[in-house]
Amino acid sequence: MGRLIYRDRASFDIDDRILAHLRIVIMNKLRRNEGFMLQLPVNEGVRQASIWVHASNALVLQFYGGREPAIDRELVDQMMHDASSADGLTLLSTGPVIAAAPPARATR
């Protein structure tokens, strides 16, 4: 389990595997000077927190696992796509592990 710390004011526990993928998304978005909204589950009676990820906001990502997680390119692509959407990137809590929200299904 890793941790994302936002502006020294809030911290969020996130599974190392998802955090590794989120790190790639953040690096790529900020490299392009693109901010994005990130929705994270919160455990303390709050359903969800939304944070604005931008180069002007300090972020710290801490990994506590013993080995580096394998990267799933399809998951990174989906997370990049979601981060670029109007709603931003949403991470869901399913038990103790946070997983990327499933892709929206196309309707005909």
Image (spheres, rainbow, N blue to C red):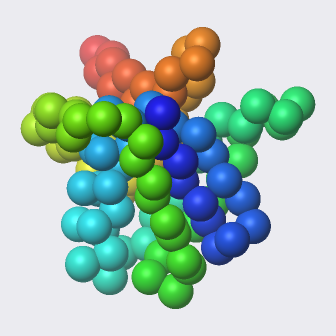
Residue 94, how many percent across, how many down? 56, 15
Relative to the observer, which residue lies in front, 83 or 23? 23
Residue 98 lies left or right of residue 75; in this view the side is right
Relative to the observer, which residue lies in front, 99 or 69? 69
Relative to the observer, which residue lies in front, 67 or 80? 67
Residue reaching furthest to the right: 45
Is residue 28 shown to the viewer in this render?
yes
What is the total number of numbered labels drawn onto the structure image?
Answer: 0
Residue at x-position 51% and y-position 21%: 97
Residue at x-position 34% and y-position 62%: 26
Is residue 85 shown to the viewer in this render?
no
Residue 88, how many percent across, how many down? 48, 51
Residue reaching furthest to the front: 66
Residue at x-position 88% and y-position 31%: 45
Residue at x-position 52% and y-position 86%: 56
Q: Name the image quarter holding the C terminus.
A: top left
Residue 38, how many percent across, how many down? 53, 53
| 9 to 31, vertically: above or below | above
